Amino acid sequence: VVYLGANVPLQNFEATIASVKSDLIILVSQTLQTAATLKEVALALNAQDVMVAFGGRVYNRLPALVKQIPGVYLGEDLRYVTPVVEKIFNTSQPRKLELSDLSIDYKTRSYFTQRRSRLEEKLLSEMGDRMPYEYLEMANQHMAENISAAITLGNIDFLDPELDWVQGFLKNARLSENLLVEYLRKYRQA
């Protein structure tokens, strides 16, 4: 077992994989954002015929997300990972997804990324008097990163659980819950 750690850049990761010649790579993501990155890494490994298994909290919250990742899902419970890994080694290769099989919309992600700063400026001008700047900036960053991740993962509905984070954030900041509705409405309009 070789533990590579967290946040390994894709270029370094690919070089390490080539030198280690691993039989199986296990990837974990906890958030929608890291699931989007995991998908990109899994596709790169898939192209090199490296077996991938994956898991993490985000897949428990969004079971439909499992179908977007090329590899073997390790399940919802850490206690059952070892039997799943043993099964991987005792059966045929896991399913592979080709990029064409996935509903990644790069044009949509690019469109959103190009307009993000204007969107956030508009929100600042419309919500700046209702919400402290640092909170608005943090909520905007979280929303934008998760929208981009949902687009990468091919389903904007994956964003739904992330709205709970924004709601919890506003509540912890002791801001009105009605502010979330207003914020989301303004975000959509922007």
Image (tube, rainbow, N blue to C red):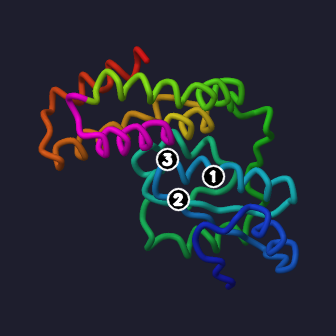
Kind of residue indicated by mark 2 = Ser
Residue 2 in the image: state x and y as whole percent: 69, 83
Q: Which residue is drawn at 44% across and 27% down?
A: 121
Q: Which residue is drawn at 51% across and 42% down?
A: 145
Q: Are marks 1 and 3 in contact (CB under 8 Å)?
A: no
Task: Give the distance between the C-alpha atoms of the residues marked 3 and 2, in whole angstroms.
Answer: 8 Å
**Front in this rendered view, residue 121 or 31:** 121
Q: Residues within 10 Å of mark 1 (few under 14, many from 20)?
A: some
Kind of residue indicated by mark 3 = Leu
**Front in this rendered view, residue 140 or 153:** 140
Q: Mark 1 points at which residue?
A: 37
Helix, strand or loop at label 3? It is: helix
**Snapshot quadrant of residue 103:** top right
Q: Mark 2 points at which residue?
A: 29
Q: What stretch is highlighted in magenta?
A: 129-146
Q: Between disc 1 and disc 3, whose residue precedes?
A: 3
Q: Name the residue under label 3.
A: 32
